[in-house]
Amino acid sequence: MRIVLFSVFGYNVYSHGVFLVLGMAIAGYLFYRLAKKENLPTNKFLLNFIASIVTGVIASRILFYFLNLKYYTNFYQIAEIWQGGMVSFAGFIFGGIVFLLLLRAQKENIAKWLDMAGIVFPLGIGISRVGCVLAGEVGRRYYGPFAYYYHYPITAMEIYLCLAIFAINFSLYLYARKYLIDYFLFFSFIALYSFFRIFIDSYRADPNLIIGINLSQLTSFIIFAISFFTFSIYYLKRKLRQK
């Protein structure tokens, strides 16, 4: 593990913070470029992007803190984000709500913006999670192949998942976007990410609920079901309007 990436004049620079900022910067730049390519107005892009990301980071950190109170000694540790520890789904939900509200208030083309988000968000998450790996975020004890410090490398698995989703959605955008309907890339990201997280999170050290799965798996299943049925309803309504 390498929680401290390097030091500058006696000040530690933490791997979690470095890769979180790096992921946001790379995803933001690609997001901006794609928006320009789609002729979307980008004059308020920076405000919208930063507001949604900051909201998402704060929400995911707060939820992680309260779900893991037994590991903290005081409330001020909630601000120690450089130590790692965030609940990504809380970030998606609250960051996404802020993003949608801003787009709606600005009367933007919500479908196109969300589809661009469906391309770049998994890339940003994947890059930021590198810092989580270096900070030591792992799953249950495991001594087999690919073990990371004798634990399941669940965060590394999430990185590969995010990069795969990015590759799929970006390829669809480049080579097949004329065949895609509105919101497809966005719901593709949400559905694929939440579906595979059901399996990845089974290796977490979290205690199982009464129903035999942990809280992360249950959250993933709920988000997958909501995204799948929401897009299915939208698709059917769209087909009916075309008749």
Image (tube, rainbow, N blue to C red):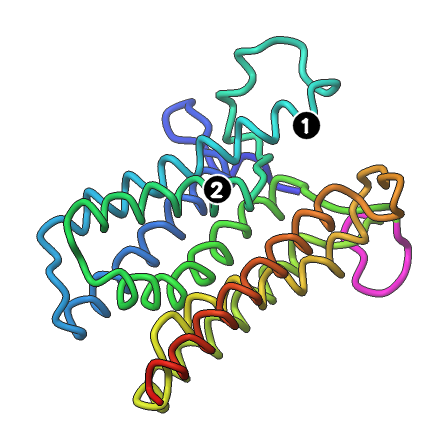
- Taking depth in this image into account, of 225 and 134 the one nearest to the observer is 225
Q: Amino acid at mark 1?
A: Leu
Which residue is pictured at 42% across the width and 24% down the height?
11
Q: Is residue 188 above or below residue 193?
A: below
* Residue at 66%, 64% in the rendered image: 195
- The residue located at (58%, 62%) in the rendering is 193
The image quadrant that residue 143 belongs to is: bottom right
Report the side of 218 relative to 147 (left or right): left
- Is 177 magenta? The answer is no
Q: CA distance from mark 1 to mark 2?
A: 15 Å
Magenta range is 142-149
The local crowd at label 1, few if under 14, some if 14 to 19, many if 20 or more residues have their Cα within 10 Å, is few
Residue 44, given in percent of the width and then of the height, sits at: 13, 48
Q: Looking at numbered disc 2 in the image, what kind of residue is underneath it? A: Gly
Picture quadrant of residue 208? top right
Task: Give the image quarter of residue 118.
Answer: bottom left
Q: Residues within 10 Å of mark 2 (few under 14, many from 20)?
A: many
Count of all numbered marks drawn on residues in the image: 2
Residue 67's label in the rendered image is 1
- Residue at horizontal 63%, vertical 23%? 66
Instruction: Decide whether the magenta segment is chiefly helix, strand or loop.
Output: loop
Which residue extends farthest top?
Answer: 74
> Against 235, is 219 above or below?
above
Q: Quadrant of the N terminus?
A: top right
Quadrant (top left/top right/bottom left/bottom right) for the C terminus? bottom left
Residue 58 location in percent, x, y?
44, 31
Q: Nearer the viewer, residue 133 or 24?
A: 24
Which mark identifies residue 91? 2
Q: In the drawing, does residue 137 fall left or right of residue 17?
A: right
